[in-house]
Amino acid sequence: MSTYVIGMDGGGSHTRVALADENGKVLSYVQKGGCNRYHDANAEQDVLEGIAEAIRIAGLEVEQIASIQAGMAGLDQPEDTVWAEALLAQTGILGRISAVNDTHIAHTAAFGGEPGIVAIGGTGSLIMGKTE
């Protein structure tokens, strides 16, 4: 059986959802409105619709998704992460569900876990540095 994964980059203005196979080939890409629940009344709807649409465009069923990793604006406190992961669970994905602040995925993409500083300047602004 093939493994499919979803990556989501959710900012204050846009939420981008990509679905890929085990080789990293992107099978679908969807863009919706922002996902910061503190600034966008449609945040939950945009996240859920974006994920469902990405799965549909790829011609898959939700049961085929092995995991989803989401970087989302506004996940600044532990309760924000609890909210986000509960929201992602509403999609019906039974595999691994993980949500982190969008700064963390930007840092990982830029430095692959190594030390470095990343600055986000968009709808909101953040700077994150890692020394170890």
Image (cartoon, rainbow, N blue to C red):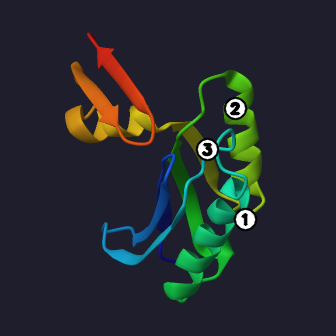
Dot 2 corresponds to which residue? 80
Q: Which quarter shows the C terminus?
A: top left
Left/right placement of residue 92 relative to residue 21 reads: right
Q: Amino acid at mark 1?
A: Thr
Q: Amino acid at mark 3?
A: Asn
Residue drawn at the location 31% of the way across and 66% of the way down: 24
User: Going from the N terminus, do you reach mark 2 or mark 3 first?
Assistant: 3
Numbered label attached to residue 36: 3
CB contact under 8 Å: marks 2 and 3: no
Numbered label attached to residue 65: none
In space, the residues marked 1 and 3 are separated at their CA atoms by 18 Å
In space, the residues marked 2 and 3 are separated at their CA atoms by 10 Å
Q: Amino acid at mark 2?
A: Asp
Residue drawn at the location 39% of the way across and 26% of the way down: 126
Under tag 3, what secondary structure?
Answer: loop
Under tag 2, what secondary structure?
Answer: helix
Q: Residues within 10 Å of mark 3 (few under 14, many from 20)?
A: many
Dot 1 corresponds to which residue? 91
Residue drawn at the location 58% of the way across and 85% of the way down: 56
User: Going from the N terminus, do you reach mark 2 or mark 1 first?
Assistant: 2
Task: Locate residue 127: give its quadrant.
Answer: top left
61 and 53: which is toward the camera: 53
Image location of residue 61, percent across then percent down: 64, 81
Image location of residue 19, percent across then percent down: 45, 70
Q: Residues within 10 Å of mark 1 (few under 14, many from 20)?
A: some
Image location of residue 98, percent across then percent down: 59, 43
Query: Please, is residue 93 above or below residue 75 in the view?
Result: below
Q: How many marks?
A: 3
Residue drawn at the location 33% of the way across and 38% of the way down: 106
Query: Please, is residue 14 above or below residue 86 in the view?
Result: below
Q: Nearer the viewer, mark 2 or mark 1?
A: 2
Q: Nearer the viewer, mark 1 or mark 3?
A: 3
